[in-house]
């Protein structure tokens, strides 16, 4: 192969890549120039060296503008750490904070504020053991209790979810649901820590019940405002038993299967006053109506809540601590990582009794998440 040929062959792919995606693959241009230089004379080497310097200047400028673009996504209301929205609907990535028992109270107060607005946060880069996970969780508030899952030994408030590579069947939390919606005080927060994360798959999706409320017509809002939902424990143990490796507290099964708890359908967030639809996969019927009459309405509410534009998706990394404001969202685990292991630690924080939103005859003017 002649020197000329080598040069042409070497250049072509790099030029092509530059056109396809000059920002992401920019560093390959420099690599390309260096490789070309090995094959040509001193004059060309000088020219290529100049080109490489020029290119690296351009690349630095590009990196700086990319950084600027990224920092523009940062929510400037929160200064103690970096908060970047995951989607336009809900959810945020949080970076630049190490949670431990020694983290100061203000950091936890600020995280709760982020949760009031975004409802889901993925706190990246944590290094937690079950013990320190428990300690961090209790800084958010007392344990809500979990009558369904067997806790890990020595920590009454922590459950381990393990999925082995050759496990089959459902994963824990598969299908859209709210955690423990049939409790009088459903957990205010669920906290899940990624200890072992599959290289691909195993994300968790979330849907906003505030956005669902905003999507309703005035007529539908008025209809739902007067209704009370009856959320039942029936079937809860069956669903969990279909999940491999989940230790269940069968001592509670009978009582929970018979449990029926009433919650208003249109509620107000206690901190922000924002209205949301309190709907869950265990909402069996509206008070004074049959299950058959209720089902089409609940199916409709679940369907509009979980439309893609009202969701976000957390892509896990090892060391991610995801916290969600449980009553304001639905969530679902995605069963798409067979052949890989996934291990998470989980706990829940005590919540409040859901509060009915004040009756409203005028159209809703409650502030949106972004304007809050
Ligand atoms: O593992 C997940 O992604 C979510 C599981 C779940 O539904 C939960 O922890 O409540
Ligand atoms: Fe769940």
Image: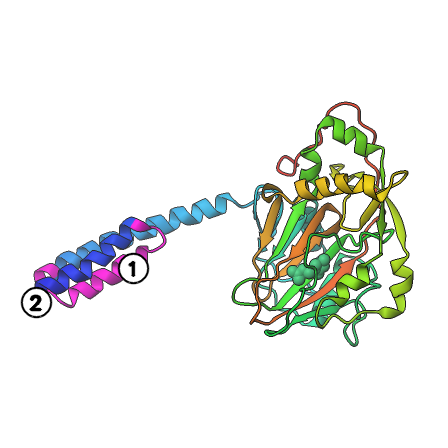
Which one is in front, 359 or 247? 247
The answer to whether residue 277 shows anywhere in this view is: no
Measured in 3D between alpha carbons, the distance from the residue under mark 2 to the one under mark 1, in whole angstroms, is: 24 Å
Sequence-wise, the earlier of marks 2 and 1 is 2
Residue identified by numbered label 1: 28
Q: Is residue 85 magenta?
A: no
Local SS, label 1: helix
Which one is in front, 34 or 145? 145
Which of the numbered marks, if any, corresponds to residue 211? none
**Residue furthest to the top:** 362
**Rendering coords of residue 240 (x, y %):** 76, 64
Q: Tell me if residue 135 comes above or below residue 86 in the rendering.
A: below
Q: Is 81 displayed left or right of 147 in the figure?
A: left
Q: Is 226 displayed left or right of 179 in the figure?
A: right
**Rendering coords of residue 75 (x, y %):** 57, 44
Which one is in front, 240 or 139? 240
| Range of magenta residues | 20-44
Q: Tell me if residue 89 comes above or below residue 123 in the rendering.
A: above
Residue 246: image quadrant is bottom right
Q: Is 139 displayed left or right of 80 in the figure?
A: right
Quarter of the image with the N terminus is bottom left
The answer to whether residue 122 shows anywhere in this view is: yes
Kindly report the secondary structure that dominates the magenta region of the rendered protein. Answer: helix
Q: Is 353 displayed left or right of 313 in the figure?
A: right
Taking the image as four quarters, which one is ligand 1 found in?
bottom right
Residue 201: image quadrant is bottom right
**Rendering coords of residue 163 (x, y %):** 64, 71
Residue identified by numbered label 2: 2
**Residue furthest to the front:** 292
């Amino acid at each position: 192969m002649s020197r000329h040929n080598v040069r042409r062959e070497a250049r072509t792919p790099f030029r092509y890549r530059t056109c396809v995606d000059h920002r992401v693959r920019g560093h390959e241009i420099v690599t390309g120039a260096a490789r070309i230089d090995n094959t040509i004379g001193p004059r060309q080497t000088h020219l290529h060296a100049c080109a490489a310097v020029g290119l690296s200047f351009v690349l630095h400028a590009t990196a700086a503008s990319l950084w600027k673009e990224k920092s523009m996504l940062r929510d400037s209301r929160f200064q103690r750490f970096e908060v970047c929205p995951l989607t336009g609907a809900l959810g945020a990535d949080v970076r630049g904070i190490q949670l431990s028992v020694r983290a100061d109270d203000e950091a936890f107060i600020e995280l709760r504020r982020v949760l009031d607005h975004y409802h889901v946060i993925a706190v990246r880069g944590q290094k937690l053991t079950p013990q320190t996970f428990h300690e961090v969780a209790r800084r958010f508030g007392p344990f809500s209790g979990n009558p369904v899952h067997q806790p890990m030994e020595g920590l009454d408030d922590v459950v381990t979810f393990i999925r082995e590579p050759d496990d089959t069947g459902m994963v824990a939390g598969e299908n859209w649901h709210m955690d423990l919606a049939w409790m009088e005080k459903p957990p205010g927060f669920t906290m899940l820590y990624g200890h072992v994360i599959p290289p691909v798959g195993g994300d968790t999706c979330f849907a906003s019940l505030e956005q669902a409320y905003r999507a309703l017509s005035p007529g539908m809002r008025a209809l739902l405002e007067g209704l009370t939902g009856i959320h039942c424990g029936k079937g809860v143990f069956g669903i969990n038993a279909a999940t491999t490796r989940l230790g269940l507290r069968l001592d509670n099964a009978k009582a929970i299967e018979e449990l029926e708890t009433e919650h208003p359908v249109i509620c107000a967030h206690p901190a922000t006053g924002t209205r949301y639809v309190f709907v869950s996969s265990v909402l069996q019927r509206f008070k004074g109506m049959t299950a058959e009459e209720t089902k089409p309405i609940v199916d409709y509410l679940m369907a509009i809540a979980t439309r893609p534009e009202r969701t976000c998706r957390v892509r896990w990394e090892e060391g991610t601590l995801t916290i969600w404001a449980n009553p304001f969202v639905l969530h679902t685990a995605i069963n798409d990582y067979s052949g890989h292991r996934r291990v998470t630690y989980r706990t829940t924080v005590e919540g409040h009794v859901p509060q009915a939103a004040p009756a409203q005859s005028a159209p809703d003017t409650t502030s949106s998440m972004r304007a809050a």
